Amino acid sequence: MLASRRSGPTAGSTVSLRETLVAAGLRQELADELDRMPQKVVQVDPRRPFRESGIPRDEVVFVRSGILSKFKVDSSGRRQIVALRFPGEGILPREGMSSYGIQAVVPSEILVGDAEDFNAIVEKYPELHKFFWQLTQRNENIGYEWLVNCGRRDSTARVAHLLCETAVRSRTNVPEEPLHNPFTQQQIAEITGQTSVNVNRVMADLERQGLIERHGRDILFRDWSEMRRVASFQPSYLE
């Protein structure tokens, strides 16, 4: 479940499993095998978790449209979003109990298949091991970047970095095309480890500095190079 690095879907588009896998570099025959795997289409409401933590994760999830988040909750009930999945990306099965919950960021449509069916196909075709290992490495790279973002960057750089990453992962043609911001201020706070009040201040500061221009939920990058510099954003970790 890896979005194409050449031409991929936006957060609001709907993609097929087969098309996405082929665009990501998988041979057509293997993409067909995975596409024939039994799967169900599920509409996910962002107002409530789709999956809670602490339950077996014996399924594979593929995002057709919208955005899914992985989240964890601390002992005080405060939530931290620890990962995102855009159209063309997925969540692989895992052994044992899951340590994170899953919730949609926006209304989303996903494909859900059984881990048993998925694992049988992967075991049958060794080439798939390498393909999904590359996916795991990409997600690991994104996780490291998020760790640095929350641990070392200031509040402005954190928000700027998230906006830059979202533009790239949603295939927004910046700076000519505006990013349709899928996040609420609270969701941005839960991703970047700060309060929604501070996120509001940072967004206003980015606009005053002439880095972005907001029209409702649309964000136009007025100075993409400077925005990337402020965010310390180098997109190579997304490749």
Image (spheres, helix red, strand yellow):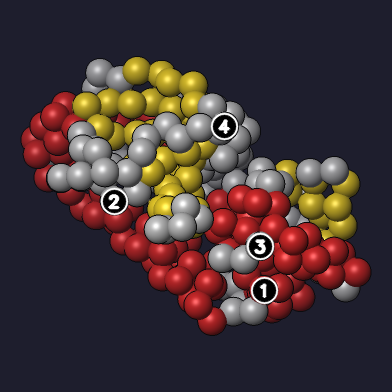
Viewer can see residue 33: no
- Of residue 65 and residue 96, the one placed in the foreground of this image is 96
Give the residue at mark 3.
195
Picture coordinates of residue 41 (x, y %)? 41, 19
Q: Quadrant of residue 114?
A: top left
Give the residue at mark 2.
99
Q: Residues within 10 Å of mark 4 (few under 14, many from 20)?
A: few
Residue at 30% x, 20% y is 39
Q: Residues within 10 Å of mark 3 (few under 14, many from 20)?
A: some
The numbered mark, 2 or 3, whose residue comes first in the sequence reads 2
- Rendered view: 230 above or below 92: below
Picture coordinates of residue 7 (x, y %)? 55, 44
How many marks do you count on the picture?
A: 4
In the structure shown, which secondary structural element does the residue marked by tag 2 occupy?
loop
Residue at 42% x, 32% y is 50
Give the residue at mark 4.
47
Residue at 79% x, 52% y is 219
Residue at 35% x, 18% y is 40
Q: Quadrant of residue 122?
A: top left
Q: Which mark is residue 155?
A: 1
The numbered mark, 4 or 2, whose residue comes first in the sequence reads 4
Task: Measure the alpha-carbon separation of dots 1 and 4.
Answer: 26 Å
Q: Amino acid at mark 1?
A: Ser
Picture coordinates of residue 12 (x, y %)? 62, 33
